[in-house]
Image (spheres, rainbow, N blue to C red):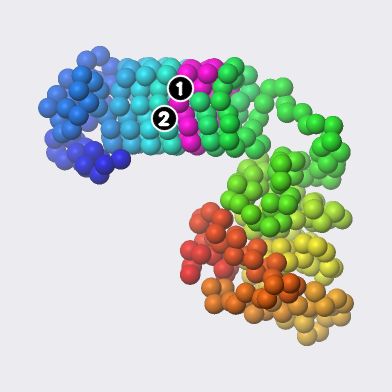
Amino acid sequence: MRAELIERWKTADGQRRRSELLQMGLRGNWPEALSGFVATSELGDNPRDLRGIDLSGQDLASADLVRARLDGARLDGSGLEYAQLDLATLTGASLRFARLNHASLHACVARGTQWDDAQLEGTRLTASNLTGSSFRRARFRGAQLEQTILLNADLRNADLRDARLFLCDLEGALLTCVQWNPPRTYPVTSQHLAEIARRAGFPSFIEPFLLPGGIMDLLHMSNRQVLLHVEAAIEASTDVQSELRAILHEKNWRIVLMAAAGIVLAGADEATLAALWARLDEWSWVHPQLMVAAVLRDPSCDDRVRERLMHHELPRRNNIRESLEWAATVGRNVPGLREPHSGHPTCQAHRWLRQLQAFAPLKVQEQWLRGGSAKT
């Protein structure tokens, strides 16, 4: 989005025209209010130039926005119920928390658009190109998405119950913890793990466990997407700390690994930290990842490490001692840490921390007690 397309609305002339548009509710012959406005001639015979406009929080129910150019527009929290947006362009626009129930957006183009938490119940989005857009927690109940392109879209935690998806292109889309009607079922090979998760008390994390490559990708922190799946599970949970503790009580290290990632992203209360350190007092294949979680999220990590190294019977295995010694050296100078030589027991912890710095959202890293790239 070119800066001048946004700045034109901040001028006295732009403010006057915007007020006229709002008085008309973007209904009727509202394009007349844009006659002679900066850059509108670029669109040729389409006078509906609203590129870069800020209409956040405005009531625009039943607005006539057919063929409107809303590239880069801000419509966060706006009311667009029953609005007509067929053939509109919303590429790069922001419609977070917008209310578009029963609106019509047939054949619109909205690439890379933000729709997080939007209400889209009964909305018509047929044959639209929504490639790369974000619809986290959006409500699509009863929406029409036939022949819609949702390539690489982020639909985590969205409500797609009763939505119509015939010939909808969902290739590469993130669908973790989406609500379906009927509810999602799992293949026979995964049903045992799903049952364990439900019975043990961590049902929100079923899908991150079952995704292809999920556990091994998480073990090596090999890509950003693996954290996105865990983040979706955290959002889906009504009591994430209880679920993290339930995971920590499991014997299988593959399951316990999920708790390390969950604590890194969501933090931990005192009860969860106690469960974490109980696991750290025993060796496991994911001891390095659990130690990283403690380093980043436990305010008392230094004291607990010191106590275990000086006064505790632990560690009973060299790998635990080396892991504790690594945690003691981390302090608040993570960027200055030298990587251990290949094969050293602390090499996994060091590399996992570095990968977290590369892939974790900055808003999460800002909450870390140390080690976030935002603080370096």
The residue indicated by pointer 2 is: 110
- Does residue 159 show up magenta in the picture? no
- Name above or below for residue 286 compared with residue 237: below
- Kind of residue indicated by mark 1: Ser
Quadrant of the image occupied by residue 4:
top left
- Kind of residue indicated by mark 2: Ala
State the residue in front, 105 or 213: 213
In the rendered structure, the answer to whether residue 191 lies left or right of residue 118 reads right
Q: Label 2, secondary structure: give it.
A: loop
- Does residue 133 show up magenta in the picture? yes
The magenta span reads 121-148
Residue most extreme to the top: 28
Q: Earlier in the sequence, mark 1 or mark 2?
A: 2
Q: Is the magenta stretch mostly helix, strand or loop?
A: loop
In the rendered structure, the answer to whether residue 201 lies left or right of residue 372 reads right
- x and y, in percent, of residue 129 in the image: 45, 26
Q: Are marks 1 and 2 in contact (CB under 8 Å)?
A: yes
The residue indicated by pointer 1 is: 128
- Name above or below for residue 101 compared with residue 230: above
Residue 205 seen from this side: no
Residue most extreme to the front: 342
- x and y, in percent, of residue 191 in the image: 84, 35
Q: Label 1, secondary structure: give it.
A: loop
Residue 186 seen from this side: yes
In the rendered structure, the answer to whether residue 194 lies left or right of residue 28 reads right
Q: Which residue is drawn at 84% across and 32% down?
A: 188
- x and y, in percent, of residue 271 in the image: 75, 60
